[in-house]
Image (tube, grey):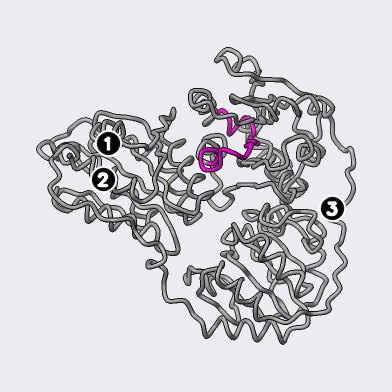
Amino acid sequence: MRIADAVIEFLYKNGVRHSFGVPTSQASGFTDGLHDYDIEYVVVKNEAAATFSAGRYADKTRDLSVCFLGGCVGVNNGMNGIGDAYRNKLPVIIISSYVKKDVMGKNALQELVSTDVTKSITKYSKTILDKDEVMNEVKKAVEIALTPPHGPVHISIPTDIQLSPFNGTIPDRIDREKLFPQFDDNSLNKAVDLINESSSGVIMVGRGSRGLSNDIKELSIKLGWPIITTPNAKAIINTDFKNNLGNFGWCTTEGAANYIDKTDYECLLVLGSSLGQMSTRVYKDTLMKGSKVIHIDWDKSEFNKIFNVDIPVLYDLRSAVKIINERTYIKNNKFIKPVANTPYVNNHTGLSMRLFMEKIVDIVPKNTCFVQDMGENMNFALKYMPIKDTMDYQISLNYASMGTAVAGAMGSYLAEPNRPHVVIVGDGAFFMNGMEVLTAKEYNLPIMYFVVNNSMFSLVEHGANLLYGRSPKGACRFKRFSITAMMKSMGIESMEIDRLEQIDDLKDIITNLKQPFVVDLICDGSEMCIDTDRLKTMKTK
């Protein structure tokens, strides 16, 4: 057995069944070793798609995800996905190659110490030069990735070490619960007491609450407290839940914004949110003002970073919400849900993105997962898309890299292959990483891609026009290309849509989808949806 084989077997013991990357001669020990294990190696078109997909996979499974990348160029190409995993605290393992030891420092082909490049966006990054330390270091790296708060790690192993004989013992599967920190029972008890003492409150749901939908809704009903969801947590509470005020933060729903600004409440219960710019309407303090704040998270570095809170609680959310549900009293609060947004007004030409977002949820299967890319189309989705109870919605708004969804949806699908997946992406982001639809075709992944084809970077164009009265010179508009024709030339089914009524024709297609399908959504970009809170902070006085 080679060292590369031992590493793969250890990963297999820890539940890894899919990996992502681009094969190189430097990493040949791993790519050859994968033949002998039931771990699918998804070969993408660019390493960025490997790291984005690994991140989406880890986000869905809440567990380990793996990339095998070439050193130097491969790792650098994958930097955006590593940064995305770091900002979203996802347990992604990046195992890269390095040149042979006997040519190090001699201007070898693709020689670069990638661990120096990745240290600032990983929890741990190391080049292993001693073959006897490989297994200990890989085990250490996996433990670090899985220790709350989760995050990416990077291990670089030279080619000759990968192929060296392994003479040690492969460790057993890592016990995830033993990696949990000592949680703060005293602070949780204080939080329970404060909730019981408070007659009114609001529950703020962040991305750390993924998987806790029913428990949080049960708590909301018990207390009679409404819920706001951060953009990264949009699907955790379905839009039509009777106590859900909707998206709060970036492109907040009007109902949520008005309620928070105009209502006095005694307690704010924050569940798994960093309370960053995108979740607080650019750090607007009306969310906190006049109320006692409980902040529950398993990352203590998030406490009091931006707002001072009364009771910070270091705890696993799943356990904490269960305890709060068991120990809080039923309250007789009566909550009347406000209208989320003002009615649609046709103040533009062409197909309406707002109406598309409101309609598409009725066309796709009821358990669809939407994977959202960056751009103005995400603004429309966050503000207007009504997520149903059995649906899911993935977005990475903290790192906010264009191309994250079109490149990463494969990982999301492989984590949940029984759930239909729909990508929503603008043409600008599609041109960055859109060739990954070929990867989806090669692996028979039935993902539907809606490409908003408006031949412009509309978020930048509209924001600049509102700020400066003009857009960046020659920067935001480009020639319109037929994405349908592009896809058909590659053997990928595609359909062009320029009227809302045509979307009805997709219902049977997506229900019976066997291969990727691209919808070329023709818009003219005249309809705007801008985050006005951020715009106000950017204007000079």
Give the x, y percent position of residue 237: 70, 57
Q: Label 1 to label 2, Cα distance in Å?
A: 8 Å
Q: Earlier in the sequence, mark 1 or mark 3?
A: 1
Instruction: Residue at 78% x, 55% y: name it.
Output: 253
**Dot 2: within a 10 Å radius of its alpha carbon, few (fewer than 14), some, or many (20 or more) residues?**
many
- In contact (CB < 8 Å): disc 1 and disc 2: yes
Q: Is residue 171 magenta?
A: no
Q: Nearer the viewer, residue 72 or 221?
A: 221
Query: Which callout, 1 or 3, points to the residue nearer the camera?
Result: 1
Q: Mark number for residue 7?
A: 2
Left/right of residue 168 with respect to residue 435 in the rendered view:
left
CA distance for labels 1 and 3: 52 Å
Q: Residue 297: x percent and y percent?
A: 54, 69
In the rendered view, tell whether residue 262 sits above or below residue 198. Answer: above
Q: Which residue is mark 1?
A: 30
Tell me if I can see residue 402 in this picture. no
The residue stretch that appears in magenta: 412-431
What residue type is disc 1 on?
Phe
In the rendered image, the residue lying farthest to the left is 102
Mark 2 or mark 3: which is in front? 2
Task: Return the residue at label 3.
Answer: 341
Q: Residue 409 location, x and y as percent?
A: 55, 38
Q: CA distance from mark 2 to mark 3?
A: 52 Å
Q: Is residue 397 above or below residue 351?
A: below
